[in-house]
Amino acid sequence: MKQIKQNIRLVLRGIYRIANGFLGFAYDFRRFVSYGGWKETLSDKEMRNYNIMMAYHGLEKSLSYKNRDPNAGWSAAEKVFLKLTQLKGITDIGYHDKAAKEVLTTFLTLAVNIDKPRAKQMLSALKELPLSSEDMHGAKEFSGDLYRQGVLANPEAFFNSRYSLREYKEETVDDELVKRAIKLAMKTPSVCNRHAWHIYHASDREIIDKALSYQNGNRPFGKKIPNLLIITTDLKAFFAGHEHYQHWIDGGLFSMSIMYALHSLGLASCPLNWSQRPKTDRALRKAIEIKPNHTVIMMMALGYPDEFNKVCSSSRRPFEDIYSEMKMK
């Protein structure tokens, strides 16, 4: 009889979990429909800039090959040119609008392109667009020595010395140091180089406590967190239907980069899970100012480590459990 009751409980629990999963999927789908970039509304500055960034990155890739096909890149160039010509009359110009013009100009003025009639036609039209960027765009030389600057003398020491820390010194981390870590993390790769991340940072006790009241895993130590990040990604950056999950991937990559960037600066951190029900996500947004098109990936606690700390001794699975040689079927 006990076994029957236990089996019934397991079945009911499974049904409950599936039902909650379905509600979560429906909520995510509604948010993608409402805020996703699938509409390609080019009058929306943010959506347009993600769109044009994706287009000119294709051109950057063409420019970056050492032995490139001299006829390659024209399809991407036409896409960028079409989007730039649609800027006429738009005064709300973004960073990537300017970058797109620079990349396209670099491509059109290549020795193999500059005398082509289409290149001359495009360059003439681009002169009518008052856009300029002081940053370098397109492609650049990058030596092996520069790559080797990133080699760590003891990478095992760096990676194995990072732990999730839940208790910190009673000292707020300066805003500039937090921003430095985020800037380092911005080297994180993203799909088509769209950089759809957005970070919300707080060191105010009232704001931190309010935000953490919606997160379940911080209760024993939340009051000791001196700085809090909410890491999000922008749904406007994702256009195709099959990209409906991509913001989670890009946001996860960026989150890990932030943790390692903080570690490199002597700061401790702890990722705080945000796998929440729609009701909780809505409640957080009512309490904390988060743009509706920004998907919350996770919260992250950070602070200075004490001289004496205790951390979870979380051993890792055997390497053989997670590694396989790739084989053909």
Image (cartoon, grey):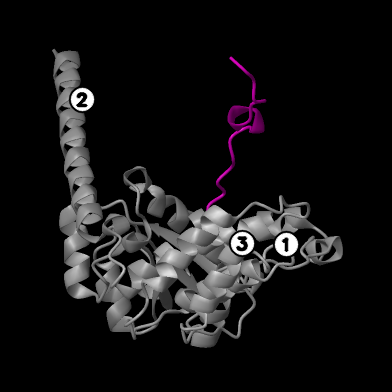
Q: Is residue 261 rendered magenta in the image?
A: no
Q: Nearer the viewer, residue 270 or 43?
A: 43
Residue 101: percent from left, percent from top:
53, 75
* Quarter occupied by residue 221: bottom left
Considering only order in the chain, which callout, 3 or 2, is on the residue closer to the N terminus? Answer: 2
Instruction: Name the mark on residue 112.
Output: 1
Q: Secondary structure at mark 3?
A: helix
Is disc 3 surrounded by few (<14), some (14 to 19) or many (20+) residues within 10 Å? many
Q: Which residue is mark 3?
A: 60
Judge depth for marks 2 and 3 and give the one in front. 3
Considering only order in the chain, which callout, 3 or 1, is on the residue closer to the N terminus? Answer: 3
Judge depth for marks 2 and 1 and give the one in front. 1
Considering only order in the chain, which callout, 1 or 2, is on the residue closer to the N terminus? Answer: 2
Q: Which residue is mark 2?
A: 10
How many marks are shown on the rendered structure? Answer: 3
**Quick check: can you spot residue 229?**
no
**What amino acid type is highlighted by mark number 1?**
Val
| Image position of 157 with respect to 213: above or below | above
Q: Which residues are magenta?
A: 312-329
**What amino acid type is highlighted by mark number 3?**
Glu
- In 3D space, how far apart are the residues under numbered discs 2 and 1 (Cα atoms)? 68 Å
Q: Secondary structure at mark 2?
A: helix
* Quarter occupied by residue 201: bottom left
Residue 138: percent from left, percent from top:
64, 68
- In 3D space, how far apart are the residues under numbered discs 2 and 3 (Cα atoms)? 54 Å
Residue at 32% x, 62% y is 236
